[in-house]
Amino acid sequence: MTALYRFEDGLYHPGSLTAGPWSPDAQHGGPVAALLAGAAEEATELQVVRLTVELVRPVPLSPLSLRADLVRPGRNVQLVEATLLSGDTEVARARGLAIRRQTMDVPVDRSGPPAPPPGDGDVGPVRKVDRTAFAEAVDICFVKGSWDDTGPVTMWTRLLVAVVEGRPASPLQRTAAAADFGNGVSRVLPFETHTFINPDLTVALARVPEGDWILFDVVSRLSGEGFGQAESQIFDSYGPIGRSVQSLIVNERQP
């Protein structure tokens, strides 16, 4: 499988790598976020610097239609919206904030990531996460923490396939795809006893990531009232590039 989706006859056909951990019939949020990110980028000539994805309902493993619109034009700032539909039913949407690009001589933080990317140092083996098929589309290398333990995690990620067949994945797409792993890898509760599903994902960039590897320094926090948040600081090989946030719905699993 060389892509998450195949575009044919006006529809996006999800492949096996899009499956998620919460239901055998639903997609992982990462492929959905990446698909919507690409649509948002195509709707504007400016740089999308913030993307908020709302997972309105479980996204089925069936052909989907996608539309994107420029809802606020402007020379310096634009707003775009993208909507994903299963038949006539909206299953996910995204809003992107785009800003004009202009070369300027200003300080850029290139202070480096918390650990070097794989290949440049000993940061541990690349691990595959067996709870979700989408993990087979991503290299994951843990710097701190692990998939097997609860608590904060620092991990390098690299998307291995195209989002849409025949189209190279953009830096924003690669970031959005991996950002949706945050709540799973930094969980504070066992999968066996609880679910902590994210109905949204926001990615905000200070600059466009460079290179294939993207690092997420992730922590989850719960409220004790049935909700919480997973937050990531994001780095590329040169330094910090932004943050991502997921809201969490926390439930006990029924016996």
Image (cartoon, helix red, strand yellow):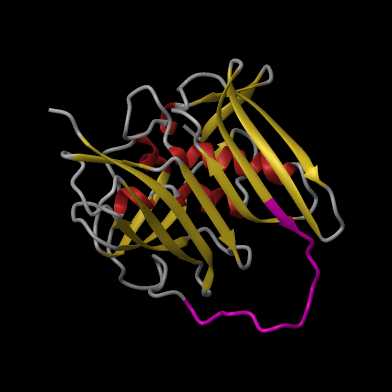
On the question of residue 127 being in view, the answer is: no
Q: Point out residue 247 in the picture as x, y percentages from the top left corner.
A: 42, 49
Q: Point out residue 80 in the picture as x, y percentages from the top left corner.
A: 72, 44
Q: Residue at x 79, y 73 (%)?
A: 103
Q: Nearer the viewer, residue 38 or 198?
A: 198
Vertical arrangement, residue 66 with respect to residue 168, above or below: above
Q: Residue at x 50, y 70 (%)?
A: 237
Q: Point out residue 129 in the picture as x, y percentages from the top left corner.
A: 29, 45
On the question of residue 150 being in view, the answer is: yes
Q: Nearer the viewer, residue 96 or 39?
A: 96
Magenta includes 108? Answer: yes
For the view shown, which residue lies furthest in the right direction?
A: 75
Magenta includes 171? Answer: no
Task: Please identify the quadrant where the C terminus is shown.
Answer: top left
**Left or right of residue 192: residue 2:** right
**Left or right of residue 202: residue 206:** right
Q: Residue at x 42, y 56 (%)?
A: 157
Vertical arrangement, residue 204 with respect to residue 68, above or below: below
For the view shown, which residue lies furthest in the front direction?
A: 225
Vertical arrangement, residue 244 with respect to residue 20, above or below: below
Q: Which residues are magenta?
A: 97-112
For the view shown, which residue lies furthest in the left direction?
A: 255
Count of picture labels: 0
Magenta span: chief secondary structure? loop
Q: Point out residue 67 in the picture as x, y percentages from the top left corner.
A: 70, 30
